[in-house]
């Protein structure tokens, strides 16, 4: 892991077009500004961890047929057809 | 446990398989992944299975979110759309992954990370709705009761 020390308003550059700037340091919180191309997704690591965790537990287990999930509400329509008159 | 024979059968009839390509995989399942999308349960039901064609033990239960969550709003950013070359809203298929519990009541849906499919190119990606406030485990039962 590369370790760099930066002060407020200083930046690091990643690759050709990603810039991370320290905007504010307050106690144990740091505000970062990130400039990146639109095709680069930026989000908090916890979100990725949460999705990884959710996906792993969503894989259907082998063996017995999966337990039926609840039937959809009666009113639900898969394709949002207009509700029929009663 | 035998590997699901329907996958093999479907693969041999490849032309008919709704096969989805996830170029960057899904979180926890990296690398390019190809999934067959097959109906699951009653034909009129909302559920489908996404079965990994290389590893059929990796199967996800998916459904269109609107069945249980009619108010679900997805604000797709350009990054996600670009990943699957999505340029027409009508080509977009939105699915959410369902996690089953030990009872039907414990089933949850992942509204934080919906699966977005480009129906024209059959490319798929799992979006991360970073600022949405949605959770990865929203109970279906609660939604069914609330609606």
Image: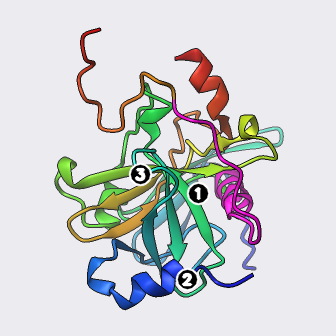
Residue with the mark numbered 3: B43
Residue at 66%, 77% (x, y): give it. B57
CB of mark 1 within 8 Å of CB of mark 3?
no
Instruction: Name the quarter where the N terminus of chain A is drawn.
Output: bottom right
Earlier along the polypeptide chain: callout 3 or callout 2? 2
Q: Nearer the viewer, residue A7 or B56?
A: B56
Q: Secondary structure at mark 3?
A: loop
How many numbered marks does the figure carry? 3
User: Which residues are the magenta region?
Assistant: A46-72
- Cα distance, mark 3 to mark 2? 19 Å
Question: Image height check: is B144 above or below B122?
Answer: above
Element type at marker 2? helix
Above or below, A72 relative to A65: above
Residue A28 visible, this orientation: yes
Name the quadrant containing residue B16: bottom left
Q: Is B103 inside the magenta-drawn segment?
A: no
C-alpha separation, residue under disc 1 versus residue under disc 3: 58 Å
Marks 1 and 2: same chain? Answer: no
Q: Nearer the viewer, mark 1 or mark 2?
A: 2
Q: Is residue A34 left or right of residue A60?
A: left
Residue drawn 49% across and 87% down?
Answer: B8
- The chain that hosts pointer 2 is B
- The residue beneath circle 1 is A10
Q: Classify 10 Å Cα crowding around label 2: few (below 14), some (14-19), many (20 and above).
A: few
Pick the residue in front: B83 or B54: B54
Which residue was labeled with disc 2? B5
Side (left or right) of B20 relative to B126: left
> Residue B86 sits in which quadrant?
bottom left
Camera-near label (1 vs 3) is 3
Confirm or deny contact between disc 1 and disc 2 (CB under 8 A).
Answer: no
Instruction: Looking at the picture, tell me which residue is in the foreground, A39 or A7.
Output: A39
Side of B75 relative to B111 (left or right): left
């Amino acid at each position: 892991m590369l370790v760099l020390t930066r002060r407020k308003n200083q930046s690091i550059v990643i690759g050709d077009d990603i810039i991370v700037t320290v905007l504010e340091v307050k106690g144990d919180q740091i505000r970062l500004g990130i400039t990146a191309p639109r095709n680069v997704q930026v989000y908090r690591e916890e979100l990725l961890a949460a999705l990884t965790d959710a996906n792993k537990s969503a894989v259907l287990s082998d063996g017995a047929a999966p337990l039926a999930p609840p039937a959809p509400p009666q009113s639900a329509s898969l394709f949002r057809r207009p509700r029929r008159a009663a | 446990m035998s590997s699901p024979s329907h996958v093999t059968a479907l693969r041999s009839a490849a032309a008919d398989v709704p096969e989805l390509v996830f170029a960057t995989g899904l979180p926890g399942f990296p690398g390019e992944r190809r999934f067959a999308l097959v109906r699951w349960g009653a034909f009129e039901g909302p559920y489908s299975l996404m079965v990994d064609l290389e590893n059929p033990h990796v199967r996800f239960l998916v459904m269109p979110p609107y069945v249980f969550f009619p108010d679900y709003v997805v604000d797709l950013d350009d990054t996600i759309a670009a990943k699957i070359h999505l340029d027409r809203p009508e080509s977009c298929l939105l699915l959410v992954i369902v996690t089953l519990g030990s009872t039907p009541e414990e089933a949850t849906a992942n509204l934080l990370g919906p699966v977005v499919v480009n129906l024209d190119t059959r490319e798929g990606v799992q979006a991360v709705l970073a600022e949405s406030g949605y959770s990865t485990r929203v109970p279906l039962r609660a939604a069914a009761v609330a609606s």
